[in-house]
Amino acid sequence: MIIGNWKMNTLRADALALANAVVGMDRLNSTRIGICSPALWIDPITQIVKHSSILVGAQDCVGDNFGAQTGCINADMVRDAGCSMVILGHSERRARFGESTDKLLNTIAAVLETGMFPVVCVGETKKQRESGKAFDVVAEQLKPLLTAGLDLGGIVIAYEPVWAIGTGLSATRKDIEEMHATVREVINRNDTVVLYGGSVSPESADDVFNAEGVSGALVGGASLNVDKFAAIVAAWERK
Ligand code: PEP
């Protein structure tokens, strides 16, 4: 599965053009492709992809019921708009809004409840890796999932080392293999879909995808460029 996380990018026309191009990629490939656009473009994008197998997702939502929460969008609304997934706990949101897996449990449960799948992001900072704490940090980010009575089979994990996001630095094959094995060990499931994210590009994709235990990628910057995203999908196809 290759998921594009467009983050806070695209005006409407760009978003719709990009979504149309991704539909073209879907016709040429058997890879499961997803688009997580800004929330405003979800509705028109679902119209564009409706005769394809492209999945549409949100980049965040809240887990609460309808109510007085100015500016928030809940899981039911996201589902009703046609989404199949929601990215939760991205490092940019963990850093900026103080999100933690603990605080997200309610949202993860609400997303699962609607039948969508959450893509829960975990990953260590550069400082944490350099001080040998990467595995502990990721394990701590995962552990709350184990005690909340969630259907772990419905959760996708994205390992995204913070130091690799948007920096052009991708984790090494060894780093990726070790961490993906750790993720599956901590959550005690071999069948979990574990994506890698962090500067995946046409240049790094073959290396990343050849790492054992990688189920696909969460792609930020390169997902905004049709040719780069298509090249990443093609790399997954030839894996
Ligand atoms: C991301 O933020 O999810 C991401 C992987 O970004 P990039 O590919 O730009 O590093």
Image: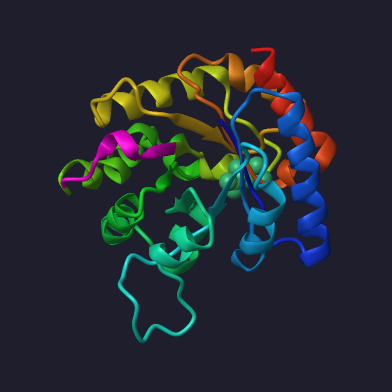
Residue 29 shown left or right of residue 65 in the figure: right
Report the magenta residues as a range.
149-157
Is 4 placed above or below 91 here? above
Q: Position of residue 151 (x, y in %)?
A: 24, 40
**Residue 204 is at least partly visible in this image:** no
Q: Give whichever of 48, 109 is nearer the camera.
A: 48
Magenta stretch encompasses residue 63: no
Residue 105 shown left or right of residue 116 in the figure: left
Location of the C terminus (image quadrant) = top right
Location of the N terminus (image quadrant) = top right
Is 46 placed above or below 141 here? below
**Residue 181 is at least partly visible in this image:** yes
Is 66 placed above or below 63 here? below
Q: Which residue sits at x=80%, y=35%?
A: 228
Residue 131 shown left or right of residue 55 in the figure: left
Q: Position of residue 124 (x, y in %)?
A: 44, 42
Q: Which residue sits at x=65%, y=21%?
A: 236
Image quarter for ligand 1: top right
User: Residue 52 occupies which quadrant of the picture?
Assistant: top right
Q: Give whichever of 28, 178 is nearer the camera.
A: 28
Q: Which residue sits at x=72%, y=52%?
A: 48
Magenta stretch encompasses residue 155: yes
Q: Position of residue 112 (x, y in %)?
A: 32, 49
Coloration mode: rainbow
User: Residue 190 occupies which quadrant of the picture?
Assistant: top left
- How many numbered marks are there? 0
Q: Which residue sits at x=45%, y=58%?
A: 79
Is 91 placed above or below 214 here? below
